[in-house]
Amino acid sequence: MTDQLDHQVTVEDLSALMKRTAGVHVDPVTLRQQSGDGFDTFGLDSLGLLGIVAELEKRYGLGLPEQAERCKTPADFLALVNGALKTGV
């Protein structure tokens, strides 16, 4: 399981999670180009983000920081989640 902690959630992963857990389809290229825009720009609300956090916690068997649920942009979310995965916190 050590290799999972080295994994980084990519923009493509986030795009797929947005579609699967919240029903919001955003092209990964668009998500990358507009990663500093708010999640609301893409039609993702706080409950949708909570679903993504829950899915990642389940996938990696790791509790993510509470701040993950409150991230406003994809860029902030990916930075926080990937930092947590790297440190295992």
Image (cartoon, rainbow, N blue to C red):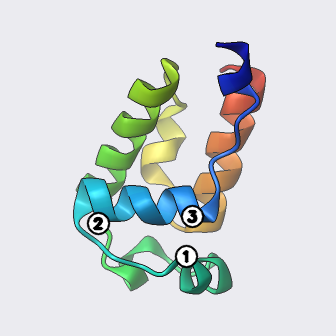
- For the residues labelled 1 and 3, say whether their Cβ atoms are less than 8 Å apart: yes
Residue 25 higher or lower than 6, as above or below: below
Q: Amino acid at mark 2?
A: Asp
Q: Residues within 10 Å of mark 3 (few under 14, many from 20)?
A: some
Residue 65 higher or lower than 14, as above or below: above
Label 3: state its secondary structure.
helix
Find the residue positioned furthest to the top. Answer: 1
- For the residues labelled 3 and 2, say whether their Cβ atoms are less than 8 Å apart: no
Q: Position of residue 12 (x, y in %)?
A: 57, 64
Q: Residues within 10 Å of mark 1 (few under 14, many from 20)?
A: some
Label 2: state its secondary structure.
loop
Position of 47 with respect to 17 (left or right) is left
The quarter holding residue 77 reads: bottom right
Q: Which residue is mark 1?
A: 28
Q: Residue at x 33, y 76 (%)?
A: 25
Q: Which residue is mark 2?
A: 45
Sequence-wise first label, 2 or 1:
1
Q: Residue at x 35, y 35 (%)?
A: 54
Sequence-wise first label, 3 or 2:
3
Q: Which residue is mark 3?
A: 12
The quarter holding residue 37 reads: bottom right
Number of the label disc, if any, that sits on residue 20: none
Q: Amino acid at mark 1?
A: Pro
Q: Residue at x 42, y 46 (%)?
A: 69
Nearest to viewer (mark 3 / mark 2): 3
State the CA–CA distance, disc 1 to disc 3.
5 Å
Q: Amino acid at mark 3?
A: Glu
Nearest to viewer (mark 2 / mark 1): 1
